Image: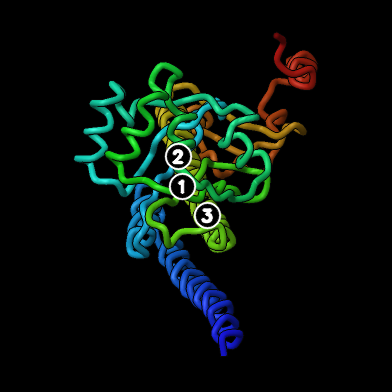
Amino acid sequence: MTAGKTKKSEVTPSREVIDHNRKLLLALSQAAQSIQQVHEPGDIYQAVGEQIKALGFEATILTFTNNEQSLRFRYTTISQRLIHSAETLAGLTAQEYNWPVFPDGVYGKIILEGKAEYIPWAGSLFAEALPLALQPLTTQIMKILGAEQGIIAPLKVGEETFGVLIVFGNKNLSWEDLPAIDSFAGQVAISMRNTRLTKQVEIELAERKRAEKALFESERYYRTLIENATDGILVVNMDGTIRYGSPSVGHILGYGPDALMGTSALDLIHPDDIAPIFEAFTEGPQT
């Protein structure tokens, strides 16, 4: 009888773990789908926070600075009141603070290896981000923020890493949640990449439209100059065939420029002048 009870107690936690993992995977899968619907970085961060918060955890997103050598704070679900208390204690402002990523540190290891890691005490993550002189305050800051154990996962897609996602909170979060959080972070990274690519396309289209508009304005400007010039202007091909004649040509020659289309410009030149003009024409402009 005792053996039977022991066996049951050994099996029950495993079933609970499996059930917990299944629910977490389902919830994060649904969360990933909702994140795919937004197209602004701030909206992505907000969606991630809402979904993680709904699971009973807290989330913080850190992204690379422009030189990709440092991380900076971008978003957290922790209340602003608690953030302000921690900032006052540390003498730092989270939004303006960034710190270097060292290869042998927790952040560097996660980014280098490209996979999530369970952190038994989230304070180690905050300690690494703080200046050396402020690291003794880590425990106090953790108490203010209410952060316990956590999971840190790289926001990585392909060979590109955008930063890290940190999920932390109560004792329900364990190392067994690593695959689910890691997979979710990958989906978040895909959304971040897609958002960036969309912005790049929008910028390129806007630049192309500006270039096309500038070209149109330039063409209209010079066409206006040519069409209102008192001198007759002809545009010819390399073989001397006329392809355009300005309106003034009609006033000078007595017949419209349309009658000249397809004819040779050399027919309008006095025979004595054809040789030097033809030579200059074939040699092209001199620089």
Residue 70 point in image, percent of width and height: 52, 27
Left-right relation of 215 to 159 = left
Which numbered disc, 1 or 2, marks the residue that appears first in the sequence? 2
Residue marked by disc 1 = 166
Q: Which mark is residue 247?
A: none
The residues bearing labels 3 and 2 have C-alpha atoms spaced at a distance of: 12 Å
Label 1 sits on what residue type? Answer: Ile
Query: Secondary structure beneath disc 2?
Result: strand
Q: Position of residue 155 (x, y in %)?
A: 54, 47
Which residue appears farthest toward the top when viewing the image? 287
Closest to the camera, between mark 3 and mark 1, is 1
Q: Which residue carries the number 3 mark?
A: 185
Quick check: can you spot residue 251? no
Q: CA distance from mark 1 to mark 2?
A: 8 Å
Q: Are marks 1 and 2 in contact (CB under 8 Å)?
A: yes
Q: Residue at x 71, y 31 (%)?
A: 267
Q: Tags 3 and 2 in contact by the CB under 8 Å rule?
A: no
Estimate how packed mark 1 is, as few (under 14), some (14 to 19) or many (20 or more) residues with alpha carbons within 10 Å: many
What residue appears at the point 35 percent right and 38 percent down from the top-left corner? 142
Q: Earlier in the sequence, mark 3 or mark 2?
A: 2
- Going by the numbered disc 2, the residue's amino acid type is Leu
Q: What type is the residue that disc 3 sits on?
A: Ala
Q: Which mark is residue 62?
A: 2
Indicate the position of residue 280 as horizontal and vertical percent values: 75, 15
Which image quadrant: the C terminus? top right
